[in-house]
Amino acid sequence: MSDDTSKGTLGARGGQDRGEELAELGVPLEELVRRGARDILQRAIEAEVQQLLEEFASVSLIDGRQAVVRNGYLPAREILTSAGPVEVQVPKVRDRSGSGVKFNSALAPPYVRRSARVAAALPWLYLKGISSGDLGEALEVLVGEGAKGLSPGALGRLKAQWSEEYQGWARRPLVSRLGQG
């Protein structure tokens, strides 16, 4: 029993030693979190594409080759998350049969540059009185130096979008919602 206990202690201590080694190398905790988030996200995207390929594994061309195959990666891009900027590479899929099979990751959809949590924080910060000039700085403090894509122009577009959404909400008919009419 003491052997099991000592092994468990050594295992836990081994992990602690590894953490201390990384800390001694000067890797900040935030960077370790970002690396972990990137690895998990990349693995999840790879699982998504693998699932798609398995769905079409039985589809083949006349000459016997698979119709739907992997075809490299899209260019790497950063997604701003609550852990900071995380770089991802989304795999490409080629449909040799021409039937239109395409891979779009649910986790990293095309053109998405901010996670839903970060996107939700922007209007909240703005409503709390953070000026558009300071919004980028506030996000930089929250998610790190990689709070890119939040230029005054981008924030202006977001404010215009929020204003349009508010106007639509303010003009919605209330009569039908109350069961009258």
Image (spheres, grey):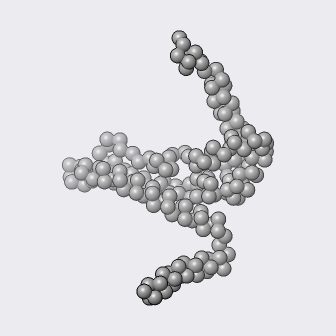
Compared with 43, 23 (above or below) is: below
Compared with 168, 129 (above or below) is: below
Residue in the picture at 63% in, 48% down: 118
- Give the percent coordinates (x, y) of residue 127: 73, 39
Q: Is residue 100 left or right of residue 43?
A: left
- Give the percent coordinates (x, y) of residue 45: 45, 55
Q: Residue furthest top?
A: 181
Residue in the picture at 78% in, 44% down: 130
Q: Residue furthest bottom?
A: 3
For residue 168, say whether it is visible: yes
Q: How many marks?
A: 0
Residue in the picture at 20% in, 52% down: 63
Q: Quadrant of residue 146?
A: bottom right
Residue in the picture at 39% in, 54% down: 49
Q: Quadrant of residue 119?
A: top right
Relative to the observer, which residue lies in front, 100 or 152?
A: 152
